[in-house]
Image (cartoon, grey):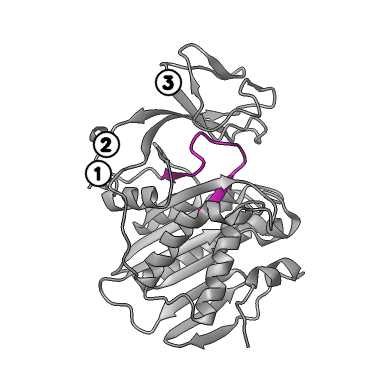
Amino acid sequence: MAIFNNYLKQLLMSKSNDSNLSEMRVGDLLMTEHSLGIIEVTPRQAGENSTAYVYSCGIHGNETAPIEIVNDMLADIESGVLKIKNPLLIIFGNIQAMREGKRFIENNLNRMFSREHKKYDIEDDEPKRAKEIEESISVFFNKYKNLNKVHYDLHTAIRPSKYPKFAVYPSLKEGRCYSKNQLKLLSTMGLGAVLLMHKFSPTLSYYSSTTHGAEAFTLELGKVEKFGDNIRPNFKDTEEVLRSLVSGEKFETSNKYPKLCQVKKELIRHEQEYDFKISDDTANFTEFKKGTVLASDSVETYKVEEDGEMIAFPNGNVKVKQRSGLIMRVVSPSDIQIV
């Protein structure tokens, strides 16, 4: 019986967050549903040159394109169309938010990782889910601690963007360098820019990068749409690379890096009275002139410090003490350590 064919339909129609803990063999693969929306795909034998992959989606429930992409991959793995040579953990994140077509229910799930969920009521669904996702990733990566580890956390953005697809590269621990191979893979996926984070962030990709030493990224793959409204050919490059990586198929990679954008500051909403001067139709990577005031409250006023500074993820409606945007500037490959 097909268990993972249109798994998404099962997630959306179910009124429970409990799993039947399904397990099945597909040829040389073992497919195991550890809990609802968390599925491990295990090849019979992972060689020493294998890579352990995590593909997560739906951390924000209304970001539907990545959910559809991963759902289709899961169906093709079960049917044998997609051959898997590398260990893979698939995560559908905020299931209740997916059902309700919302970014989140009570609190932003992608601000609850690296143990930040402890600051919330653990009986609430989202901090409970954050803890469960962390634990599942830890078990998976520890199982393959001798392999290379890669995590792609797949999203779409609320706003339009000068670069429709882009990535966020978490801040790296001292001694780690940016990966030449991964930057070129991101370009091959069709991503036009990479944000290089500058500090701790409670995001899922930061957790995998810092806690497990994985090459981990948040991939922003386009604009938020309803289920069924995504133009799937727009995601072809990304989808092909994601499939090829886990199947072990060789493919030609780009010789170019995406545009590299170093984050220099987070804008924070310090209090309820907040004058956020960036309009709702301002696209990611919009540039500003020196002296332009972007946000202001009684704690801080931010003026652009140099011509060409750009904004990413502007959102003046976040909760108090949360990030309302990232300020960044373009850097060249020679400005950073790439190995």
Amino acid type at image mark 2? Pro
Q: From the viewer's perspective, is residue 281 above or below residue 302?
A: below
Q: CA distance from mark 3 to mark 1?
A: 24 Å
Q: Are marks 2 and 1 in contact (CB under 8 Å)?
A: yes
The boundaries of the magenta stretch are 154-169
Chain-order first, disc 2 or disc 3:
3
Q: From the viewer's perspective, is residue 147 above or below residue 270?
A: below
x and y, in percent, of residue 308 in the image: 42, 20
Q: From the viewer's perspective, is residue 281 above or below residue 187?
A: above
Residue 111 seen by the camera: no
Residue extending furthest top? Answer: 291
- At a point 49% along the width and 55% down the height, the residue shown is 153
Q: CA distance from mark 2 to mark 1?
A: 7 Å
Disc 3 designates what residue?
308
Q: Is residue 100 left or right of residue 93?
A: right
Q: From the viewer's perspective, is residue 16 above or below residue 291?
A: below
Disc 2 designates what residue?
333
- At a point 68% along the width and 74% down the height, the residue shown is 18
Disc 1 designates what residue?
338
Chain-order first, disc 2 or disc 1:
2
Q: Residues within 10 Å of mark 3 (few under 14, many from 20)?
A: some
User: Helix, strand, or loop for circle 2?
Assistant: helix
Q: CA distance from mark 2 to mark 3?
A: 18 Å
Q: Are marks 3 and 1 in contact (CB under 8 Å)?
A: no
Q: Is residue 288 left or right of residue 260?
A: right
Q: Which quadrant is the N terminus positioned in?
A: bottom right
Amino acid type at image mark 3? Gly
